[in-house]
Image (cartoon, rainbow, N blue to C red):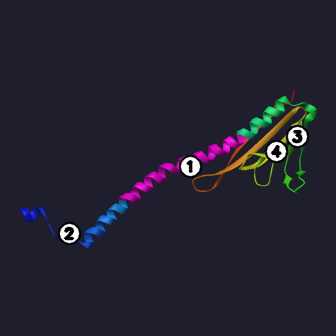
Amino acid sequence: MRKLLRSDRGITLIELIIAIGIGVSVLACAYGLVNYGFRPYGENAARIRAQQALRTVALYVSRDLHRADPDGVTIDPMAVTPEGDYYADRLTVDGTIYQINKSGEALMNGTPMAGGLTELSFTRTGDTVAYTITGVYLDRNREEKTVTVTSSVTLR
């Protein structure tokens, strides 16, 4: 009986390799499940960050346009900074300048407000200023997706 309970033999190399293979397979399955579960989270987080950046810019632009004197609102369709950077549109609201730089950052008086933008455009028809803000994020396949905010404000 004592001989059956205690073996001096140990395990063979084949048994060890099989045990390691089973352990690696279990870990690979667990990693796949966790990675699959977190992938949509990462894409949603990137999309939400892009949307928040656009909403931040839209909030400031709308707020300043609502408060603005109609004579204090100008749109420059092509603006050039002293550093030689070109901007598609530049909105000036009572001295506050909104524009996007070539790095995709929305700027308010030269201070970055939000990044990841591809478009910040303004049009004025009478006392109405319309604007479009477009940003990008990467989806789970590492492809660029866009989000856009379009709005208009009637000046007082």
Q: Amino acid at mark 3?
A: Thr
State the predominant SS element of the stretch in magenta: helix
The image quadrant of residue 120 is top right
Helix, strand or loop for disc 1: helix
How far apart, in angstroms, are the residues tagged by discs 1 and 3?
36 Å
Q: Picture coordinates of residue 137 (x, y %)?
A: 65, 50
- Outermost bottom residue: 13
Q: Picture coordinates of residue 130 (x, y %)?
A: 82, 37
How far apart, in angstroms, are the residues tagged by discs 3 and 4?
12 Å
Q: Earlier in the sequence, mark 2 or mark 1?
A: 2
Tag 4 residue: 121
Tag 2 residue: 10
Question: Could you tell me which quadrant the N terminus lies in?
Answer: bottom left
**In the image, what residue occupies the spot 90% across and 54% down?**
82
Q: Based on the picture, tell me whether residue 122 belongs to the magenta stretch.
A: no
Tag 1 residue: 42
Query: Between tags 2 and 3, which lies in front?
Result: 2
Judge left or right: residue 143 versus residue 19: right
- Outermost top residue: 156
Judge left or right: residue 115 versus residue 95: left
Q: Amino acid at mark 4?
A: Ser
Q: Earlier in the sequence, mark 2 or mark 3?
A: 2
Helix, strand or loop for disc 3: strand
Q: Picture coordinates of residue 50 (x, y %)?
A: 67, 45
Q: Earlier in the sequence, mark 4 or mark 1?
A: 1
The residue segment tinted magenta is 26-54
* Residues at circles 2 and 1 in contact by the CB criterion of under 8 Å: no
